[in-house]
Structure formats: structure tokens, C-alpha cells
Image (cartoon, rainbow, N blue to C red):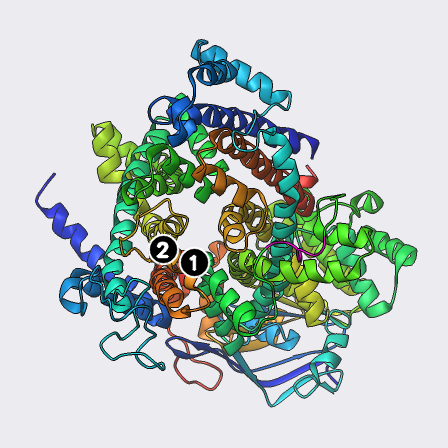
Amino acid sequence: MTEITPTATERPRLAALAEFWHYFSMNRGAVIGLVVFAILVIVALFAPWIAPYPADQQFRDALLLPPSWMEGGRSAYLLGTDPVGRDMLSRLIHGSRYSLAIGLVVVTVALSVGIVLGVLAGYFRGWVDVVIMRVMDIILAFPSLLLALVLVAIMGPGLFNAMLAIALVLQPHFARLVRAAVMAEAGKDYVTSARVAGAGHIRLMIKTILPNCVAPLIVQATLSFSNAILEAAALGFLGMGAQPPTPEWGTMLASAREFITRAPWVVTFPGLAILITVLAINLVGDGLRDALDPKLKRS
Amino acid sequence: MLRYILHKLALIVPTVIGITICSFAFIRLLPGDPILAMAGQHGVSPERYEILKEQFGFNMPIWQQYLSYVWNVLHGDFGISLATKRPVLTDFLALFPATIELALFAMLLAVALGIPAGIFAAVKRGSWFDQLTMGVALTGYSMPIFWWGLLLIIFFSGYLGWTPVSGRIAINFFFKPITGFMLVDTLLYGNWAAFVSAVRHLILPAVVLGTIPLAVIARQTRSAMLEVLGEDYVRTARAKGLSPSRVINIHALRNAMIPVVTTIGLQVGMLMAGAILTETIFSWPGIGKWMIESISKRDYVVVQSGLLLIALVVMAVNLIVDVLYAVINPRIRAR
Amino acid sequence: MALLEIKNLTVAFDTSVGLFKAVDGIDVSVEAREVLAIVGESGSGKSVAMLAVMGLLPSTATVTADVMTFEGLDLLRMSPADKRKIIGKDIAMIFQEPVASLNPCFTIGFQIEEVLERHMGLKGRAARARTIELLRLVGITDGADRLGAFPHQMSGGQCQRVMIAMAIACNPKLLIADEPTTALDVTIQKQILDLLVSLQAEHGMGLIMITHDMGVVAETADRVIVQYKGHKMEEADVLSLFENPKSNYTRALLSALPENAVGDRLPTVADFKFTDETGAAL
């Protein structure tokens, strides 16, 4: 390869990026989602400095206080306190770290495993393909949350095992996507010519085929990110995910359940935090899909 | 058509075998000695240990264990629950109607609201109705339904006092189940008050369980409809001088329903996952609650067989949806 | 009185880059029993004008005209419900992609009978008999067996015949054919054209043939309108158009026909500069 190649591909790539941003920024919802998500990332990164108190600090004189604007609330505890006197706002702020970490870890694991399996199946075809895709079918045959629950039952409850289980459950979607893309691309002329030029299997796949299925993968990754947060929260709620006193939002909901009538705010805020996070990511995902999908672009 | 169905059946066979392997492997994947794991902190006496070992066939070679497991399953023997001491299948069949009833109403709600909303949003593309509907749909799609259920309980049961909080019917009514479907049974007994109570118990759980399918169906209907409305044959229908409602409800909708039916089928798995959470929140005595309780009670025989049974049910429903898909799609039916 | 009379028709589309005029001040008139061809390249607005008459344009389009009448009835100020009583009955249209133009979910029998029921009140056995007769008229002799067929089970040519049967079902006074043969095999094209012309003569319909193919024009038309970029370049009867084209654009179109090529390079219309009827440059 000559020196010209990178600069030659840089231009269209920048142009494509500009075009993508043009379409993405026209979608008001997507931009709002992106802003909310950016704020969440900042909150998560600087949680110890932003939060008024540590997540596990108890105030014995302030059990189950309502939010500050309600009768009986105190301005020191903006969103009230939980049954053992911990500041809700501080716990929520620290909880954002868990949710974003869950999304990041799950998507990374699911994406890597899915790409490897999908490329293997799509490129080698034959029995490799049959075996891999049958296994994917079997995973998808189980309701996702049920399978995750059972996996956690085998591995033992805990946040890390929950993340692994969710990654395993979400991974077939990536494998299927990559396989389909690889099979579609593998027949095209440029791949044949790369092969004729002597590119090895691995190089062929990483350099030539994969970049062409990036768009659907990004969209799927975004949707999986929000899915992972929801599923992890559900596992936490069922007592199989993060364990108390971890300020994970789903786990917080589980321990707040019995105070549902006496102190609705301890139930309201963690769920609201989950909803806002997931909604923001899904808004971004919708925007990405519309901006990356050339079929919708024309209309 | 028949060939299409046979083809679909053939595709399912390896998956079903895989599912049996998964559920077979489950107990053997438990960390440590599976029997001790199942017994939990209570422990077991040496005699009981041997009985259980015999019962699970842990002293046979692994392939023999698998074959005998499949043999038993084929004969309807899914093992005995460690907690209730009843056959797992008996418990499953007793609890399953409650879940079907709940899931059916959730789906009914989702379809009855989602499809019209999607159609209307597509026809009025870009209008305030479209934007509002799609905003609400995305919110519903992003909803942690366990929290949504709690919120509804706070508002409708706590604040307004309109709906009961848990169970399928008020405790002062007791029926020997006929069909297992509360709404049907109360009517069969001719007890109107009991029927009303059953409906009141069903509403909130059905709303909660139906939320995500509703959102998905509304979104899918809208996008399918938008695509179809741009097709040439819709223009032809309008060129015939047909009324807009006939163009939309007959010519466009019929085509748009093809992908929507697939979506509805895919929601069945989601529904089972959602049932676990919904039944837990509303103490709904169905298989979702049964599974989660069995997991926490370490009743792994139930978990193993429940996993298998639920997966089989989902596969069966998906097969039915595939057939339905062929029925509404002439390109497959008339081959 | 002309069958269809259009004066100063303008169709503008609202696009993200501003207003785009697909048709700009066009006059069209068709007499009963006349075959009018509208010729132009793709994008010249020839279909758009006719879709405007049918009311089939999307909501992003704005249609204005000084006059748009059919048999003296004002199509512009007519209520949509009244217009739907004419569309499909007295004015019918067939399209470029016959396979895509038929609904894949319904049998062709259903799709033809639907028109008969809508406009003629024919139902059941009567509708079926008329449908079989219509199919015979368009050259499908085993119509009775074909009623239950779905579009995907038929060839493109057969689908176009079905579209024609549907269009002539209510004995329309005007048939608009939008590139009816473009998507078909060359061997089928001639058959369909012959069918259209003979049906036009037998039923005494007005026929508007929208095409980019000068061969089609020569074969079918009485009178020709040449259109370019939304403007009318020339209007003439077919003989004088071919023998003595007045506009540069028509000359360009004719010289772009392979059989008229001089030298070793086929000219394209892009080699010429044009003005519209008023002499304004385009």
C-alpha cells in the first residue's frame, strides 16, 4: 500500500461524518437525548464531588424524610432520605455510575463476543455457521430475563455475574447482525479482489468487511446499552443483581418496596432515574438509526 | 403452505433439542454438589442424599442421564418439586392459566391500542398527534415496568383506592377452578360480583405487562404503515376513487400488518420475561412468580423444568405466529 | 368543449432546500377520442401534471391552475368526495410499474371487482362476469381461472393487462397511461401499446400517453406536447412535429434517437440550449 491511501479515505470519512451529524442534529429528540446522556456521564464521572454526601452515610435524625419541597422535608436533603437515613440524591448520583458501567461493560462484552462469533459464522459458513447460529437460536428461545435469572442462579447473585448473564443474553443479536453483514459483503467484488491480492482471512475481515457493517452495529449497541441498564435494574429489583447497600437504582427500588405507601418518594426517584437514562439513550438510538439508515434518509 | 409449516417445524427441532440440553445442564452446572446446592442451608441426611442421587440418576454416565431425562420429559415426568412435593407439571398446569390470562389481556390491550395509534400517527405524519404518540411510545418502550407497576399501585390503589393491590380475586370469593381462567370461571359459576372483582384485579397488571408491547406495536405499525403508504399500489387504490378510509384500512393496513404480526410474535418472549416482574409486583399467582420463588427457595427441579416448559411454550407460540404470518401473506400462502 | 382542459397549471413541492416547481405554467387540453402524447425526459414534470389532475400527489405538493375542468366540471373547486366519483370511473390511470401497482395481498379478481362495486354498484356474480369479460378484452382469455391469482403469480405484462382491465372497467372517457410500457420487456411493449390503441378506438376514449419514447409517440399519438423541466416546449400534431419540429429541444430529442444519429457520436439533449415557448432561456 502507498502513502496516499489514508489521506484518500480521510476526506470521504469526514464528509460522511458531517453528513451524519447534519441528519442527526435535525432530530430534536435525539439531540435532547444526547444532552441528557452527556449530563449523566458527567454526573457519573464526578459523582463523589457532585453528591452532597457519601452514598452510604446515615443520618439517624433523618429517617424517611420527604423531599425538601414537601411538608416535613429539609433543604439539606433535596430529594429526601431513605428508611435508614441516607440522602436519596446522593445515592441516585452515585447510582448513575453503576448504570453507566453496566451498560458499558455489557455492550463491550456482548459486542466483542458477537462480532467474533458472527464473523466466524458468516465467513466460514458450513458447519461452523450451523453450530454457532443454532446456539444463538437456543439462547434467543428463552425469555431474556428468565435466562439471565437462571444464569445468575448458577453463578451466584451479584452485579458482576448479572452483567455477564445479560451480556450473554444480548450477544446473539450482534452475532446475527455481523453474520448477515459478513455474508452480504463477502460476495462482493472488492472482497474477492482483496482476497486475490493475497489478504489473509483475519486481515480481510477486520480491514475490509467489518467497517461496512459498523452502522447497524452502532444502532444495536445503543439499544443494547439501554436494554442492559433495564435488565440489570430488573435483576437488582428481584434481588439477583447488585446487592444492598450498593446504590444501584434497581436494588434501591427493591429495598424501598415496603415503604411504597408511607414514603412514595423512595420508590419514585430511583425508577425515574432509570426511565430518564434509558429514554435518553433510546432517543439517541432512534436518532442514530434514522441518520445512519440510507433508506430513510431519502424521504 | 403445508411445506412452509413443515419447514418451520424442521427448523425448530434442533432448537428444542438444544433447550432440553440447556435445562438438563442447568442442575449439573450449579456450583459444588448439585444435591447439596439444592438442599441449601438445611442440609440433607445421608439416606435422603442417596435417594435424591438415585432420583436424578447422578450415578449414571452423563449421556445416559440425558437420555433418561429426555425420556422422562417425553412422558410428562418433569420431576417432583422439592418445596411442594408435587409433580412439577401439576404445579405448572395449575399456575399457567393465570399467566395466560394476564398475558392475553396485556396483549389484547397492546394490540387494541397500539395498532390504531400507529396507523393514525402514520397517516397524520408530523402532526402533534404523531409526535405525542411516538414520544409516549418511546417512553413506554424505555419503561422499567417493575417501577411503573409500583407507581400505578401508589396512584390507583393507594391514592384513589380504585383497584386492589395483589392477587387475582378478592379473598372472600373461592372457586374450585374449572378452566383456571378467573374471568371464565366466575362467569361459569354465574357469580357477577366475583367476575367484577376478577376484572378489577386484572386491570393494573395487564396495563403494566402490556406497556412495552403496546409501545413496540405502535412504533412498528407506524413505520410499516409509512412504508406501505408510499407504495405504488396505494396510489392505484386512490386512483380507483376509493375513499381514504378504504385505502388505508383495506389496502395499506393489510400489507402493513405482515411485519406487525412478526413483531407481535416476538413480543411473546418479552411477555414471559415481563410476567416475572409483573407477577412479583402484584402477587399474581402465575408461573413468573413461581419461577422467581423457586429460584430464591433453591427449588432447582422446578427452575429446571420451568425453564424448559416456558421455552417450549414460547417456541410453540412463535410457530403459531409463523403460520399466521403465512396466512396473511399471500406470497407465502399461495406457493 | 374539450374533454380535459387545463390552463396555467403549476405544481410546486415543498422540499428541505426550498420550493421546487415540477410543473410551471402548463396548458393541456384533450378532446374526446383523441390520443395526446406528453413527451419529456424523466424529471420534466410530465407525470406530475397528470397526477395533479387525478389528485394523487402527496401533501407536500401545491397545485394551482387558472382552469382545470373535465367535461366542464371544475376539478379544482370540487369536493374530494365528488372528485372520487369521477376518478377511477370517468378518468382512469395506469402506471409505469404494473407489478408494484397491484396490491400484493389481494387477488386480481378482488382488485378489479372493487372498482365495479365502487362505481357501478356491481356485486357478486354480476361483478365476476364483468371482470372475466374485462380480462378477455385485455387479452387474458383464461380470466375465470385467473380471478384467484395474486399479482406475484403473474408476469409484468399480464399485470399491466390487469391494470388496464381495471382502468377501463367503468368505460372511462379519459385514460391516462403513465409510461405504461417502460418497465416491460421489449416484446411485450408492442402488445400493450397495440392493446391500448385498439381499446381507445373501440371505446372512443380520450387517451393521454405519457412517455419519454419518441417511438411510442410516433406509433400512437394524434397530437404531442413536448415538456422540459416543467415547461411546455412545443405542442403540435404528430406529423408536423416529426417533420418540422419548431423548438430546439424537440430537435435535440429527435436527433438523440439512435436512428437519426449523424457521425460517430450520439448527441444528447445536454448538447443543446433551450428556450420555452415564450423564448425565455431555461
Tell me, yes or no, whether the highlighted magenta stretch contains residue B172. yes
Q: Report the magenta stretch's main SS.
A: loop
Observer-side mark, 1 or 2, equals 2
Would you place residue B43 above or below residue B119 in this image? above
State the residue position of label 1: B144
Would you place residue C34 above or below residue B43 in this image? below
Helix, strand or loop at label 1? It is loop
Q: What's under tag 2, amino acid-wise?
A: Gly
Q: Chain of mark 2?
A: A
Q: Contact, CB < 8 Å: mark 1 with mark 2?
A: yes
Would you place residue A110 above or below residue A71 in this image? above
Of residues B98 and C111, the one nearer the viewer is B98
Residue A131 visible from this viewpoint: yes
Categorize mark 2 by other alpha carbons within 10 Å: few (<14), some (14-19), many (20+).
many
State the residue position of label 2: A250
Whole-percent x, y for residue A64 in the image: 33, 69
Q: Is residue A292 shown left or right of residue B25?
A: left
Q: What's under tag 1, amino acid-wise?
A: Pro
Whole-percent x, y for residue B48 in the image: 47, 18
Of residues A212 and A77, the one nearer the viewer is A77
Residue C179 visible from this viewpoint: no
